[in-house]
Amino acid sequence: MAELLDPTTLRHYAQQLGLRPTKTLGQNFVVDANTVRRIVSLAEVGPEDVVLEIGPGLGSLTLGLLETGASVTAIEIDRRLADILPGTVATHQPGREAMLRVLSADAMAIGELPAPAPTRLVANLPYNVSVPVLLHMLARFPSWQAGLVMVQLEVADRLVAPPGSKVYGVPSAKLAWYADAERISTVPASVFWPVPKVASGLVRLTRHQPPSTSASREEVFRVIDAAFGQRRKMLRSALAGIAGGSAAASKAIAEAGLEPTARGETVDIAGFAAIAERLAAVN
Ligand code: SAM
């Protein structure tokens, strides 16, 4: 039995389950072993790692991760998929079953993980919830320091966008609180079953210290949400609601060293943190 899943074997498991992949759960499974090995190699996973995987599905990527000798903690919302995963590992990589922990749960609702704590995150994220799931994993489980996620190409571009870019927005700014992000490769739609409409991108994440500020993450994120909630507006109007008026917003923005007439898409995470700090000081 091959160590990784080929298209025929994957379809066979899906058929046995009577699985009809759903768009709601973003169920597009990787059917190409070379793609799996490329992802695992770009993720730089090694035997010392404890990998957190979201949405293992039929196990394509999970088997690739286990092949390196790493252990894997996998969170899968679809109970049928979660239930068959240990058996799939036992069949394709006998002896490695003990290296896998599967939680059948919604990744966004998970507050605790079994020990040992993850060192890396590697996931082909469910497309419709990729950003909130990623932000939740960053906030809730600070032990992992590096990661590689596969997301829709357009989402990949938004995640890595710098200030000033057309696609810089809430996901880019919030992700920058936690990590450096780099789009390192693309993955064609043809390696998935079912074949999605768009290609995917691989984003490498490297944790860094959040900007140094006395404002809390929640306070900074509130400023980001407000700044992009009214994207075309100048910061002083966009932030008026949370600052208690446009004059108070202007003051906080200027004290943070920024132009009150600037727009949110030009402000980096350190700038948002500085504004939040000034707002917290006066409120
Ligand atoms: N990792 C597999 C692969 O590469 O072939 C499957 C990836 S598929 C894009 C996304 C997976 O995430 C599906 O198995 C789906 O059931 C699961 N999923 C969707 N929403 C989820 C959630 N909120 N929490 C955990 N898993 C979820």
Image: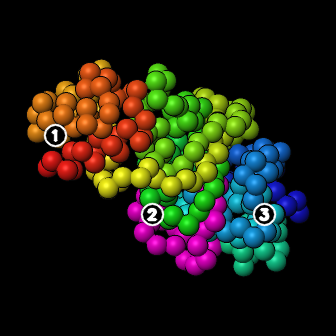
**What residue sits right under mark 1 in the picture?**
243
Q: CB atoms at circles 3 and 1 under 8 Å apart?
A: no
Residue 220, image x and y in percent? 32, 47
| Residue 93 versus residue 225 in the image, above or below | below
| Amino acid type, residue under disc 3 in the picture | Gly
Distance between mark 2 and mark 1 Cα atoms: 28 Å
Residue 89, image x and y in percent? 75, 68
Residue nearer the viewer, 38 or 243: 243
Give the side of residue 58 with respect to residue 2, left or right.
left
How many numbered discs? 3
Secondary structure category for the residue under label 2 = helix
Secondary structure category for the residue under label 3 = loop
Region in magenta: 101-122
Distance between mark 2 and mark 3 Cα atoms: 23 Å
Q: CB atoms at circles 2 and 3 under 8 Å apart?
A: no
| Residue 58 versus residue 197 in the image, above or below | below
| Amino acid type, residue under disc 1 in the picture | Ala
User: Disc number at residue 46?
Assistant: 3
User: Disc number at residue 140?
Assistant: 2
Asked whether 187 falls inside the magenta stretch, the response is no
Residue 58, image x and y in percent? 67, 57
| Amino acid type, residue under disc 2 in the picture | Arg
